[in-house]
Amino acid sequence: SIKMAFCRLDHLVVNSSPISSAQTGVHEQLATLVARHADPAHPFRKPVTDYNQRAFDASMAAWRAAGEPPLILDTGCGVGLSTLHLAARYPDHFVIGIDQSADRLARNTHWDGPEPANLCFVRADLVDYWRLAHEARLRPARHYLLYPNPWPKIGHLARRWQGHPVFPFIVALGGQLECRSNWQIYVEEFTSALNQLSGGTFRTEAWQPDQPITPFERKYLASGHTLWRVVADLDAQALTGRSA
C-alpha cells in the first residue's frame, strides 16, 4: 500500500559534510569500462531473481490499471519523497518509485498533504528492474537517478552506475534521463559515459532547484553544497543520430 506520512523537517538542524575523495576528475578507466560493458561479445548475464520479476510485474500491472499514461521512473527513490513530488508535478503521468530497501520505503516521506494517486512504489533491485524494463521495451518519458550512492573511493568506479555493467540498459531505455548529485565528479562521469554510448553532447551543470524534492537534496542545500545534474533527452538524440 502507498505510504501516508505527514511530517516536516523544518525544525531540524542539518549539516552535511561535502564528499571527500582522492579522485580529482573523471576516472581514467571509465571509457574502457563503459566500452567493455556495451560490447555484445560480453553480455551481462546475471540471472534475474524471481522476486524482482514479481516486483516488476506488479508495477507494470499498476501502470496498466492507470491506463498506461506516460511513465516516469524514479530509480533509487529512498523514502519516496521524490516520487510523490514527481507525481504531483506531472499529474498526467504515472510514476514508479523503485528502491531495494524495504526499510527506506516504509519510513516517513516528509510529505505534507494528500498523496497523489498516479504512482506506485515497488521494492526491487535496480539492476534487475532496469534489465526487465529493457526486455519489456519500456520507454519512460522521464527517468530519474537522484543522489545515488557516490562510492567516492578511486577503486569504487565499478560500483557507480556509470561504471556498472547495467549502465547500457539505463541508456537504452531512452526518454529524458536526469542524474543529480552533490559530487561534481559523479555527474561528470555519468555525463561522459552517457555521451560515449549515445553519441550525444550532453553537459554537466551546476543548478539550484526551486524546491528540493528529496531529503538528501534538502540536506545538501541546507549545508551549502553545490548541486550538479545532467539532463539528457535520449529520444531526441536518437532521432538526431538517425538523421545525421
Image (tube, rainbow, N blue to C red):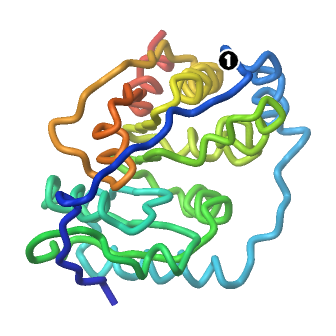
- Please provide percent x and percent y for residue 173: 52, 46
Occupied quadrant, residue 111: bottom left
- Please provide percent x and percent y for residue 184: 51, 23
Q: Residue at the location (33% across, 30% down)?
A: 224
Q: Residue at the location (20% across, 73% down)?
A: 7
Q: Looking at this rendering, what residue extends furthest in the left direction?
A: 113
In this picture, is 238 found above or below 49? above
- Please provide percent x and percent y for residue 129: 59, 65
Tell me if 36 is positioned left or right of 12 in this view: right
In this picture, is 124 found above or below 150? below
- What residue does disc 1 label? 26
Q: Looking at this rendering, what residue extends furthest in the front direction?
A: 13
Name the secondary structure under disc 1. Answer: loop
- Please provide percent x and percent y for residue 80: 35, 67
Tell me if 241 is positioned left or right of 1 in this view: right
Q: Residue at the location (45% across, 19% down)?
A: 204
In the image, 17 versus 128, the foreground residue is 17
In the image, 237 versus 221, the foreground residue is 221
In this picture, is 136 found above or below 235? below
Q: Residue at the location (24% across, 74% down)?
A: 67
In the image, 30 versus 135, the foreground residue is 30
Q: Where, quadrant-wise, is the N terminus in this rendering?
A: bottom left
Q: Looking at this rendering, what residue extends furthest in the bottom direction?
A: 1
